[in-house]
Amino acid sequence: MTGLEYWLPVIFFFLMGIALFLYIILDGYDLGIGLLFPLASAEEKNVMTASIGPFWDANETWIVLGVGILVMVFHNVQGSVLASLYLPVTFMLVGLIIRGVAFDFRLKAGLKKQNLWNQLFFLGSLIASTCQGWMLGSYITGMTNTPINILFSFLIAISLPFVYIVLGASWLLIKTEGELFDKSLRWARHAIIPMGIAFLAISIATPLVSENIAEKWFTLQNFIGLLPIPLASALVFIGITWLLSKPEILKAGWEWMILFGMVIICIMAAIGLAYSLFPYIILDKVTLWEAAGSTDSLLIILVGTCIALPSIIAYTIFIYYIFRGKATHLTYGEN
């Protein structure tokens, strides 16, 4: 195997992981805000919508890039991956469609129908987030439908929404003030403990569903080398929990630390997942090189990616810079 034959699939595996990681963080707080909708007043719902409105399209671009890399680069397995995940992918898309329609229609509808769109925005967010959790769990277990693997997928399906809720509340701490800020603080406090329990349970369960992952993590040399990942995650989790109990610190300009801490935890989880899976694109079944296309086609795709990726990054930075600061009431005009 030549240098390019080896490294091109690795590079695209890394880029796909980065794209999906950024999607989880960025669209994750969008989904989290949707999950928090039933707990907010009508006026607060408008501010929450305004806080994500300018970033909505940029955030969802990352899943398009990630899935695009899977389809174009690892096309030898994309059929089996999507076929195995057909139902959760379908339901996720339905949830995203419901969420998108509700997002655009809720303020354009009359007051009598606005509550319906608010409920649909919550429902779409819930469907999408739980389906994404199921897909992640199924992918980690090599998409095999044994009872323990199905149970593991279910565990992640009910855990991922708590991650999104904390991300959503963290975003609201940055973008809002006053009573909604205080509510967001309470929401984050209530969700952080279930999220921590879920992360711990997943960390314990993951080696149980794969002997390969267990061997990678629990040989003595590897365990010592990988110990900084769970230790860093635990320390950051403790730091977030402590900060959430100190509103005076957060209101003094440190509210961004909660979202920053969540990003660190997600980075640690992503590093651990990438280490657990590598060099497989489907765990214990198909390696990156077996799944990838020819070197010539990958070079062409790499050129396109090198054009698209900086454009997406530049657009995202531009949008976040232009719409920095606190969110205000959002309206499309009088109903």
Image: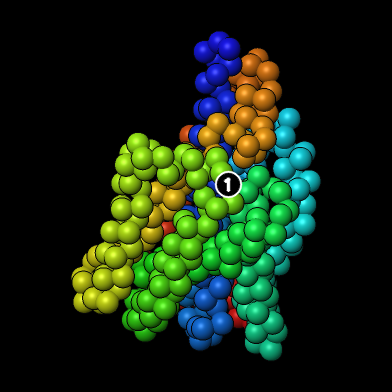
- Going by the numbered disc 1, the residue's amino acid type is Ser
- Across and down, in percent, residue 84 comes to 76, 48
Residue at x-position 67% and y-position 67%: 127
Residue sitting nearer the eye, 4 or 67: 4
Q: Is residue 41 above or below residue 196?
A: below
| The quarter of the displayed image where residue 96 is located | bottom right
- For the question of whether residue 98 can be seen, the reply is yes
303 on left or right of 101: left
57 on left or right of 275: right
Residue at x-position 47% and y-position 39%: 216
- Across and down, in percent, residue 315 comes to 49, 44
- Across and down, in percent, residue 177 comes to 34, 76
Q: Is residue 147 above or below residue 73?
A: below
Q: How many marks?
A: 1
Quarter of the picture containing the N terminus is top right
Quarter of the picture containing the C terminus is bottom right
Residue at x-position 65% and y-position 52%: 138
107 on left or right of 201: right
Residue sitting nearer the eye, 134 or 67: 134
SS label for mark 1: loop
- Across and down, in percent, residue 26 comes to 49, 55
Residue sitting nearer the eye, 77 or 258: 77
